[in-house]
Amino acid sequence: MIHQTPLFAARDGEHCLLRVEGRGTMRESPTFLAFMLQELSAPAAQALVDLTACQYLDSTFLGCLVALHKRCGHPPNARFSIVADQPTRERLLTCTGLHRILNITDRLPVGTICWTPIPVCSPDAREFKQHVMQCHQNLAQCNGPQSATFQRITEQLQRELEPRQS
């Protein structure tokens, strides 16, 4: 089945821009994280994730945002930020408390932006489960209002990943 991608990339000179349109879910999250980590691999690289056209982010996708923040989002040398106006912040980030953790700006840099779709890849089942587990562990470590729930999900996925004893 062919799915339309909700992920689009662009450059404005100094920034890599990535836009999430519609829904950002666990299906797109491995592609999103791999793309962003590749873009941020250079020491001076800067990235913005535009959520202004996003209607929904699931917990796995939110865990990817936390992973990127941990790696490149801490001030004063933050290289990773989210673009979201106040209603978008409230809709997508407030329930997990991420609006207090992530670097957020109200708008993209001014200028013409030419967005290119990013095809979504599918990792194998074990890699996918590890990805989902790590994303939920990231959320659990944020000590937000749902941290205990995310920790239980992490523990369950860890048990599922353990080799079975014969």
Image: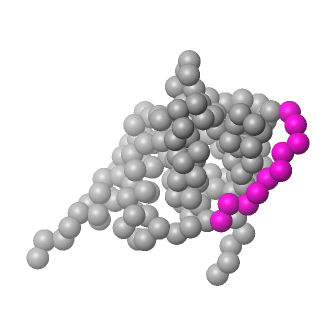
Which residue range is magenta in the image?
110-119
Q: How many marks?
A: 0
Quarter where residue 4 is shown:
bottom right
Point out residue 126 in the picture as x, y percentages from the top left corner: 36, 67
Q: Residue at x 76, y 31 (%)?
A: 106
Q: Residue at x 72, y 55 (%)?
A: 8
The colour scheme used here is: one colour
Q: Residue furthest left?
A: 166
Point out residue 54 in the picture as x, y percentages from the top left corner: 73, 50
Q: Does the image show residue 45?
A: yes
Q: Main secondary structure of the magenta part?
A: loop
Q: Residue at x 39, y 64 (%)?
A: 127
Q: Residue at x 45, y 49 (%)?
A: 135
Magenta stretch: includes residue 77: no
Quarter of the image that includes the C terminus: bottom left
Point out residue 93 in the picture as x, y percentages from the top left corner: 62, 39
Quarter where residue 21 is shown:
bottom right
Q: Does the image show residue 62?
A: no
Quarter of the image that includes the N terminus: bottom right
Residue 110 left/right relative to 118: right
Magenta stretch: includes residue 118: yes
Point out residue 76 in the picture as x, y percentages from the top left corner: 56, 18
Residue 139 left/right relative to 81: left
Q: Residue furthest right?
A: 112
Q: Residue furthest bottom?
A: 1
Residue 8 left/right relative to 60: right
